[in-house]
Image (cartoon, rainbow, N blue to C red):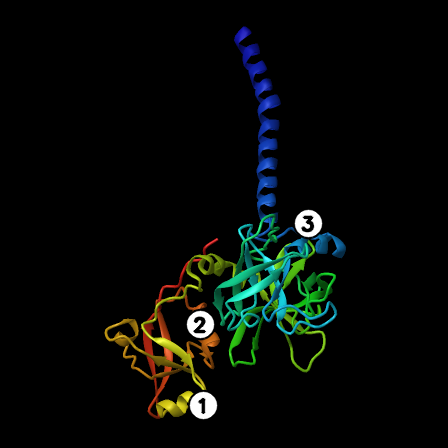
Amino acid sequence: MTNVRTTEWSSLLFRFFTIPFLLLLVIGLALGVLTAYAEPPIGSVPSHEKSLSVPAVVAKVRPSVVTILTRGMPATPTQAQSGSGPGVIIDESGYILTNNHLVAGIKSLVVGLSTGRLTPGRVVARDFLLDLALVKITATDLVPATLSPFPVLEIDDESVVAIGNPLALKGGSTVTVGVVSAVDRSVLTPDGETLYGLIQTDAAINPGNSGGPLADLSGHVIGINVTIAPSTQAISYAISMDAIYPHIQSMIVRGSVLRPDLGFRPVTITASIMASFGLEGDHGVLALNVEPGGLTAVGGFQNCDIITTVGQHQIYNLGDFWHSLRPSGDQPTLQLTIQRTNAQSTISLQNPSLPKAVP
């Protein structure tokens, strides 16, 4: 009889303690799965954190915004500075990110900090295809901006703040506010190259205002203001940080953006280049200095071939060409259409290895 009662009590204890524990375990696992799926992508900012007011965003970002003077100082505090534009401090050691077109042909310059202090600077890296440049200064107590490496943006529902100083006026930077109206835009620049990975916004970006940060309502920099759409109103563009961030370390270390070695030098064709080489064509990239026995030569590539398409992408300039390689990064070969002495052909080339993103 004792054994039977002991068995019954053991059974009751098992049911009393074990079954609720199992239920709690199942519920906990389910909540864990739901939480995992609810977590935002790496580099994004949860929506509840994008809740700062515009003045709070400005207060957070403005100490990182500088004025870059490339043609001396204005004669009076109210005189426009023709060679000026903003930049944003990205590192405590003094690296400043801005547009390449702002400092084109310039090595030494003057940088005005948000405190009003002026300090000499120099251009240490540039890339005209991304329209980015790095300026280096030596100063203390610098406030680097918080970058959002891979911003997740809601079209027509994402407020953004553009900060810059287009006139280099006394009193500091100017602020405009808008929303994200499109992402992954591409525009043709006045020098005939194409910029990719752009954020479109209606925040006003005036002439001389490019190079400054575009921030979201978390106070994180999501892009660098670059240009406006000509002959339109309320359409401005910023280079998205996810197109910039993978190249920052390369620009700091190498002074340039790291791109794969193709075994030739690609050049955007122009009327003068076509006339110089006695070639015919209206668009494409000219292949110069093809290395004998190199990657491209093995595929039948020849010097002065004109690349007109890569895969399904029409090629008009270097921007198009390098951008067309990105979607093909996981493919073993590339299909190139080339123009050669009034004849068109297609060749297959081994896909060059692209550099890995460096955080």
Residue 189, compared with residue 63, is above or below; it is below
Q: Amino acid at mark 2?
A: Trp
Q: Nearer the viewer, residue 182 or 130?
A: 130
Mark 1 lies on residue: 271
In the displayed structure, 1 sits above or below 101; it is above
* Quadrant in which residue 27 is drawn: top right
Residue at 56% x, 16% y is 10
Q: Secondary structure under badge 2? A: helix
- Whichever of callouts 1 and 3 sits on the residue coming sooner in the sequence is 3
Answer left or right for 58 relative to 245: right
Tell me the number on the disc at residue 123.
none
Q: Residues within 10 Å of mark 2 (few under 14, many from 20)?
A: some
Q: Tell me if label 2 and label 1 are in contact, CB under 8 Å.
A: no
- What kind of residue is marked 3? Glu
Give the percent coordinates (x, y) of residue 79.
Answer: 72, 72
Q: Secondary structure at mark 3?
A: helix
Residue at the (65%, 77%) spot, across then down: 229
